[in-house]
Image (cartoon, rainbow, N blue to C red):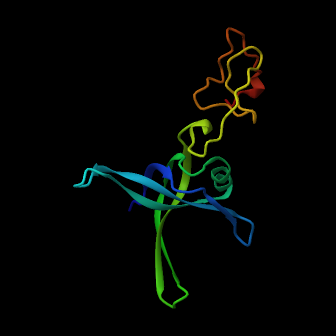
Amino acid sequence: MMNRVVLVGRLTKDPELRYTPNGVPVATFTLAVNRPFKNQGGEQEADFINVVVWRKPAENVANFLKKGSLAGVDGRVQTRNYEGQDGKRVYVTEIQTESVQFLEPKSQNAGGDNQTNTNTSGSNSNRSQNNYTRVDDDPFAGNGKTIDISDDDLPF
């Protein structure tokens, strides 16, 4: 049997980060995923899919994704139920993630955060103030300089 979901869409609001009684982080958000066709009125329709992320990835999602962020989600569909306040059984279908990919640089998120680039060692490294490397940067571009790596640093 197979239960596998891969989605790409935009967050409809900022993720909500909570902690279980045991201190395990869990983030939830809704992903708007466009349908591959337009309706009879020529309008693009979307599905709004609930997503759940656990542990360290949950904290990363809460820290770096905002409303409008483009994200890729890989996981599985899970349905749970509980008794609502009115006594009726409520069913919830959501995606339990195995991984979340941030698909655009932070400066392009709809949240409007401006990324400040700094120039280190005369190279154009495009690092933000938090010293994160942008996704499209080549971390091994040394501008003709040799890279000093010892055999102890190699994973093989």
87 displayed left or right of 118: left
Residue farthest to the front? Answer: 41
85 displayed left or right of 19: left
Does 57 appear above or below 156?
A: below
Residue farthest to the bottom? Answer: 87
Residue 18 location (% of width, % of height): 68, 65
Residue 36 location (% of width, % of height): 31, 49
Quarter where residue 115 is shown: top right
Q: Residue at x 61, y 36 (%)?
A: 107
Total numbered labels: 0
In this view of the protein, which residue sits in the foreground, 20 or 110?
Answer: 110
Q: Residue at x 61, y 57 (%)?
A: 15
Does 87 appear above or below 120?
A: below
In this view of the protein, which residue sits in the foreground, 22 or 2?
Answer: 22
Residue farthest to the top? Answer: 144
Q: Quadrant of the C terminus?
A: top right
Quarter where residue 139 is shown: top right
Q: Residue at x 26, y 55 (%)?
A: 39
Does 53 appear above or below 152?
A: below
In this view of the protein, which residue sits in the foreground, 45 or 58?
Answer: 45
Residue 101 location (% of width, % of height): 55, 45
Q: Quadrant of the N terminus?
A: bottom left
